Image (cartoon, coloured by chain):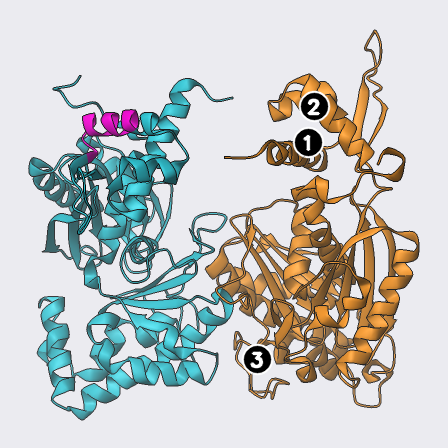
Chain colours: A orange, B cyan
Amino acid sequence: MQTQAQVRSANLAAVLGHLRDDGPRSRARLATDTGLTKATVSSLVGELVDRGLVAEGELHRPGSVGRPGTLVELDGRGVCGIGVEVNVDYLAVLVLDLAGAVRWQDRLAVDTAALPPAQVLARASAMIWQARTEHPAVGVTVAFPGGVQGSVVRTAPNLPRWVGVDVAAGLAGQRLPVTVANDADLSALAEWSAGPHAHVADLVYLTGEIGVGGGVVTGGRLLRGSTGLGGEIGHLALTPGDEPCGCGRRGCWETVVGLAALLRAAADPGDPLRDPGRDLEDRLAEVRARARAGDARTLAALADIGTGLGVGSAVLVSLFDPAVVVLGGYFAVVGEFLLDPLRAALAARVEDADRVVLSTLGFTAAVRGGAHVALQPVFSDPTTVPLMEAYA
Amino acid sequence: MQTQAQVRSANLAAVLGHLRDDGPRSRARLATDTGLTKATVSSLVGELVDRGLVAEGELHRPGSVGRPGTLVELDGRGVCGIGVEVNVDYLAVLVLDLAGAVRWQDRLAVDTAALPPAQVLARASAMIWQARTEHPAVGVTVAFPGGVQGSVVRTAPNLPRWVGVDVAAGLAGQRLPVTVANDADLSALAEWSAGPHAHVADLVYLTGEIGVGGGVVTGGRLLRGSTGLGGEIGHLALTPGDEPCGCGRRGCWETVVGLAALLRAAADPGDPLRDPGRDLEDRLAEVRARARAGDARTLAALADIGTGLGVGSAVLVSLFDPAVVVLGGYFAVVGEFLLDPLRAALAARVEDADRVVLSTLGFTAAVRGGAHVALQPVFSDPTTVPLMEAYA
C-alpha cells in the first residue's frame, strides 16, 4: 500500500519524466500521457513550478484559433547535476541542468598518477566549488578509470595508488550526495541518455585514452555484474600480442589499441607527439594533421589501431549483439582513419560492421554521464528539491 | 487505466507467482504477501483451483493449537510445458508440470546434420505427441544449438542445413504455441529458475557438446542483444589456437574446448571413444573411467580442456562479472577433472575463481529451460487456462 504522499511523489515523477523524455507539452497532453485528470495534472505542474523544476510558456500552434494553450517544459534555471572525471592526465568538471543543457565545464591537466590521491581530490573539490558558485547542484558523480564498488576504487590498472581510495570521502566537504562510477559506464549512459543513440536498448561504448574502457547497456540497462566490475575490457587479450601492460600482464587489448600504442607506432621518442607534458588534444590534432597530409607512418599506425579495434570489437559484438558500438575518447578524434580498417576486420568476423560509429561527445562523455546520474534522484522523487523560498 | 478483467488477471498472476517463488502457504499469508484482502484472495484461489492451477491441503503446523489452516500450493496435475531439444546428435523432450516437477522425458540418438530438417522435426513432433498422450501441455519451446530470430534459425555452425529453417512451422501440426530459442540461453534459464543458483542475478552458463554455447543472465534477465544473437561464445578466439572450425574459420574456442577436441586428444582414431555411432553418454562414462584409473593421456587431455576453459572463462568473467559460472553438457560429466586446471588458469587472470561450478542438470538443462519458458504464459495470465469442465 502506498501513502498519499508516495502517490503524489510518484505522480510528480511521472509528469517530470514525460517532460524529459517527450519534450514540452500542454497540461491536457500530460493528462493523456499519464492517465491522470486535468485537475490533478494542474496541481502537480503547480508544485513542480514551485520547486523550480518546470516552467510555463505560451503554446503557439500555427493555424489554430482561440486562446493559445500553455506549454509546460523542464526549467533549466533550477537544479543542476555535476559530473567530475578523474583521469590519468586530467581532471574535468561539467554542469548539466535539468533540461539537459551544459551550463559550465572545465578541464585541468593533472598528472594524477604522480600525485597523492588526496591532493588530486582537493583540486577536484576546488573545481566543484567554482562550478557551484553559479549553479545550484543537487549532487556530484565522479567518473573514475577503473573498477569501483560503492565509492571505493577496487581496480585501477593505470592509477595503482588509487586502489582502496574512498573517492566520495575525499569530497565530503561538498556536503552533497557523491556517487562514484566507472568512466566508461558513465560515458555509455551519456550516449544512451541523449543524442543519436538515445535509448538504444543494446549499446557498447568504447573509450580510448591512456587506458581502454568499455561500458555496456544491455536490454536498456547498464551492465554492472555481481560486484559492479562488469564490462572490463582493456585488460582482456582480445587481440594477439605480447606487449607488457601497466597491469603487470602481457598482451592486454589496451597495449594494442590504447593511446600509448598509437603514439609509439606513429612517432620516435624525440617527437613532440610523445611529450607527455603537451596537452593531449593538441597532440591528437597533430596526429590528425599528419594523417590528413598523407604521412605514411602515421597512416600505418592508425590502420593498425583500427584493425586491432575491429578484431576486439568482434568479440564484444558476438557477446553483446549491440545495435551500436560507439567509439569515444581518442578513437573518436582520429576516427576518420580508424573506421575503414576497423570495419574490414569486423566484417570478416561478424555481421553488420556498420554498427560501429564515432561518438560526438568527445572527451566530455564521462562527465556528461556523471552529471546525468547526479540529476536522477530529482526525476525519481521531485519532492527531494525544496519549494523555492517565495513559496515556502 | 486497467479494466476490471485486467486487474483480476493481474491479481491471479500475483497469487500464482507467490506460490511458485515462495512455496505453499495459507490464504492469510497470501493476503499479506499480495496486499490484497483475505476475501479477494479466497476468491482468487477459488478461481485458480477451478482452472486446475492450484490445489488445497491441510496445513500441519507442529505445536500449534486450534483448527488447522488450509495450505494452498501449485497443482502439478494440471497444465504442463514441453521442452524439446534439437542437437547435433540427439533429440530430447522433457515435460515439466506447473509445480516444477519433471513428468516425462525421452531422448533419441539422431544424426541431425545428415538428415533433412523436415525429417528431424517430424521425429521431434512424434516425440511431442507421445508426451502429450498423458500430459496436458500449454506450449512447446524448442532449444536449438545456434542463433535464432523469431522462430527461424539464423546461425548454426554445426548444422548449416538449418539456417533459414522455421522451426515452429515444422511443428505447426501440434496446434500449440511453439517458441524457439538458443539451447544455452534456455539452459541458463533452467539454472536460474530452480536449484542452487535460482534467481542469482548474474549467471553465465557454458555448455560443452559438439558445439560450445553460452547463455548469460545479467541483472536478473537473459541477455539477448539487439537481434537476439547475443551470448555467442563458441566461435570467439578466446584462447590461442589455429585448428579449423566447422564454421569455416580457425582457432574458435570450440576447437579448443569442444567435445571433438577432447576426444581427439584422448584417443586415437581406432579407439571406440571416437566412434560417432556410440552413445555419447557411454563414451563420456568411458573417458571418466579411464581418468579415474589414472590413464595419463586421458588426464592430460582433460587438463588441457580445463586450462582452455579457464582462459576463456576469464574473458567472460571480466565482461559479465557473474556471481556464478555454471558448466553444463559434457563439461559437467567430466568436471571433476576440469575444475582444478580451470580454476588455476582463471585465478591467474581474475578474482574469485571459485565462482565456477558444475551443473547438476546434466544434458537436460536446455529441455528443462524450454519447458519452463513454455509455462510462462500461464504465470503471466492464468486466465489463458480454461476453467475445468466440471465448473465451466
Q: What residue type is labelled 3?
A: Cys
Dot 2: what SS? helix
Q: Is any part of residue A75 visible from this angle?
A: yes
For the residues bearing labels 3 and 2, Cβ distance under 8 angstroms: no
Observer-nearest residue: B40 or B281? B40
**Circles 1 and 2: CB atoms closer than 8 Å:** yes
| Residue at the outermost front position | B65
The answer to the question of whether label 3 and label 1 lie on touching residues, with beta carbons closer than 8 A, is no
Q: How far apart are marks 3 and 1 (CA)?
A: 47 Å
For label 3, the crowd category at 10 Å Cα-Cα, with few meaning under 14, some 14 to 19 and many 20 or more, is many
Question: Disc 1 designates what residue?
Answer: A15
Q: Closer to the N terminus: mark 1 or mark 2?
A: 1
Q: Which chain carries label 2?
A: A
In magenta segment, residue B50: yes
**Is the residue at mark 3 from the same chain as the one at mark 2?**
yes
Q: Mark 3 or mark 1, which has the lower sequence index?
A: 1
* Marks 3/1 same chain: yes
For residue A218, which numbered disc appears in the image? none
B82 shown above or below B41? below
Q: Disc 2 designates what residue?
A: A41
The quarter of the displayed image where residue B339 is located? bottom left
Outermost residue toward the top?
A66
Q: Residue at x 46, y 85 (%)?
A: B348
Q: Is mark 1 on a helix, strand or loop?
A: helix
* Residue position marked by numbered label 3 in the rendering: A252
Tell me if I can see residue A206 in this picture. no
When the figure is inspected, residue A27 is found, relative to residue B57, above or below; the finding is above
Of circles 3 and 1, the one toward us is: 1
Q: Is residue A90 left or right of residue B371?
A: right
The subunit letter for the residue under badge 1 reads A
The residue at the point 11 percent across, 44 percent down is B127
